[in-house]
Amino acid sequence: MRGPQLQLDIELQRFYSDVMQSLSAFQRIVATVNKKSGVKAICEEVVGILSNELGLDHCSIMLLDESGHYVVNEAGVSAKDVTKGEPSLNRSFKIGEGVAGMVAKTSTPILISDVDQDGRFLKIESAVDIGSLLCLPVCSGDRVVGVLNLSHKRRNFFSKHHEKVFSILSVTIGHLVTFVCLQKDLEGLNRDLQQTIMERTREIEASHEYLKNIFENASDIIFTIDNEGLFTFLNKRVEDLGYTRDELVGQPFDSLLISEEGIRAFVNVLKQGGRKTLEMELKGKGGTVWQTLCSFTPLRNSGQGIVGLLGVAKDITERKMLEKKLLQTEKLASLGTFVSGIAHELNNRLLPVLVYSEILQESSLGDHELKLIKTINRSAMGARHIVESLLRFSRQETPSKSYINLNSVLNSVVNILYYRMSSGAIELKTDLDKSLPMTFADERQIEQVFVNIINNACDALEERGKEAGEITIRSYSADGEIFFEIANNGPEIQKERLGKIFDPFYTSKEVGQGTGLGLSLCYGIIQEHGGDITVVSEEGMTVFTIRIPVIAAGGYASHPVSDSREMGKAEERRDKKRILIVDDEEDQVDVMTQILKGRYAVTGTNSGQEAIEKLKNEKYDLIVCDVRMPGIDGAGVYEWIKEHRPPMVSRILFSTGDTLGPKAEKIISRIGNNYITKPYNAEEFLRKIDDILTQDEHLPNE
Ligand SMILES: Nc1ncnc2c1ncn2[C@@H]1O[C@H](COP(=O)(O)OP(=O)(O)OP(=O)(O)O)[C@@H](O)[C@H]1O
Ligand SMILES: [Mg+2]
């Protein structure tokens, strides 16, 4: 019999050796976490270590399944001599059933020293021989995550201190399993996060690419400026100005501005940091000027402080040019209306002067009186020419176009102006394209354009003084258009004057030297021909460019020219033909009556209404009718005749004091050439009457 002291020593020794083995196992278990990944691998490693270090017959770890209702075998290892030669069963226990189920449920270890004597041990098929067993909960904090099963074929193998030591180990295993599970979850989350980051990065890259495309391919220059006014970013469009982006980044925005006014306006925007849209002229690299509409918006950082400006510069050069043209056209149109009104009045006043002075010349007057009358007639004719040119200016005169060579027109103008140029020591150089296509144009009008532009060039050179003046004229054609460049090496037309030179009545010449109508007339004429005139001026070189589209033969119908008929025919027919005169102005009726009286039976009326009354009751061979009248006008009389006296339609002679309105023009175009423009002289008037009566000869009489 062993003494109690010996028994205690043996117990202590056993305890000591168990603790040492447990610590060694503990150390090895903790080390597994560094090399193993996955719960199963860790569990397998742990059961291996436990059975090795602690000399167990069998060791297994069962873990709670996903449903939380079962503990399922995760890893197990058995000593060779205890296995029954069958593979370890993939065993599971319902929570609360069997030893493992009970431990999982109660979270309390169960030690069975003799399985045969303990009813808690279910006698179910086992892969190993079991004499005694120890089952411990595997916990993570308060939560049971599984059980640790330890068994030995010997009865009474496990003692109370085994229970304590293995309790510590099972807690460690619980932490280890939880740690690995968390690590797995973390890895999963990390993978998801990386996936999300990749997707977001792709989305950001796509939207960045999209925005970049918008920025780069925008039709406007988009740029940013810092608070110092220096460029920080520019889109590709800036290359249209001739600069590279690298050249401009870091440069001040106002280095691109041309006018002082523009610089001041920009400095204000920069100071105030507000939203602003300004028209600004930008300097291109090759000296080109860009008219732009610049919109500025403040750029803020996340703290809402202003860090600069976002700018968008829209090219409005073309729009500005069109606006200028439109303005010019409007100015000309309103002036034209005004001029044509005056011309109408003047013509009416001139008619009696012209006609009576002619009639008086035929009467028996003394030499002195005859001389006076001739002077009156000449002056009236002169005044008539002035009115004619005013009407021409008002552009209401229809151009008389023919198929011509513009080089020939220029040559004839140069011949006329040759004397002026040579006497002013101005050298003329011409470079005319011999193959210049012909076009439909009004020769006289184009002549006028050349004369005025060359005369202006001579004036500019003479104004400059003695230095050798030179005028260079070049013609060429391109893309169905004809160009004439008329250049002189005179002084620069200052920018503020350049915009005005096409304005009617703008002149820099002294009183009596220029009317200021020249260029506006030229502008109107060329515009009428479908082209335009532009000018570029710098010190020592001013170039006017005329552009006219080529109109092929047949493009325009030529103006009908009436046959001149001999006066003799009128003599034959002037017996008792009856003529009705309709004009709201008494003077006009008197003048016409004076011319016709004695030759025809003349009846005068002062309104359309009165004329219609006469026509209802009387027969006439011809009606001379004014176009513009209050109440029933010329068109009204025409409509009445067309309806009630159709054969008389071709016997109406319209008289007009100005150019024709669209309604009158339509009527006259229907009745042919039966109109006469005031002021006319007696001869013209009589010839016209005779023309109509003669052409009517073959018509059936009513
Ligand atoms: N080649 C040129 N060089 C310098 N200035 C010019 C030139 N051509 C025109 N100008 C300027 O344009 C103004 C207007 O010209 P425009 O032909 O319309 O009128 P004008 O010559 O003054 O008078 P007008 O032609 O009626 O006799 C001129 O007064 C002049 O200041
Ligand atoms: Mg002129």
Image (tube, rainbow, N blue to C red):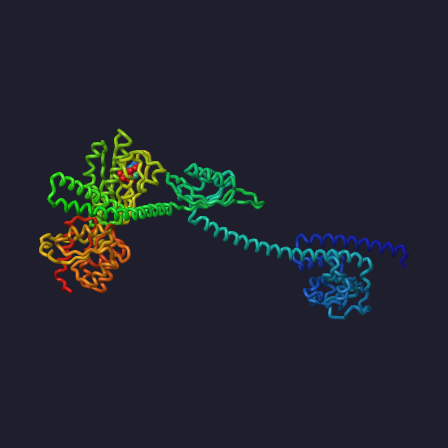
Q: Position of residue 561 (x, y in %)?
A: 17, 52
**Residue 296 vertical position relative to residue 666 in the rendered view, above or below:** above
Residue at x 82% of width, y 59% of height: 160
Q: Residue at x 10, y 55 (%)?
A: 569
Residue 51 in sight: no
Decide which of 404, 602 is in the foreground and name it.
Answer: 602
**x, y percentage for residue 79?**
73, 62
Q: Where is residue 567 in the image (x, y as percent from the top left)?
A: 11, 52
Can you tell which quarter of the image residue 654 is in?
A: bottom left
x, y (%) of residue 241? 40, 42
Q: Image point 22% across, 48% down: which residue?
A: 442
Instruction: Name the residue furthest top.
Output: 466
As drawn, is 666 to the left or to the right of 594? right
- The quadrant in which residue 426 appears is top left
Of the 4 image quadrants, the one containing the N terminus is bottom right
Is residue 671 at all visible to an observer of this figure? Answer: yes
Q: In the depicted view, which residue is nearer to us: 29 or 334?
A: 334
Count of labels in the image = 0
The answer to which of 53 and 554 lies nearer the viewer is 554
Picture quarter containing residue 692? bottom left
Front-most of 635 and 219?
635
Q: In which quarter of the image is the C terminus?
A: bottom left
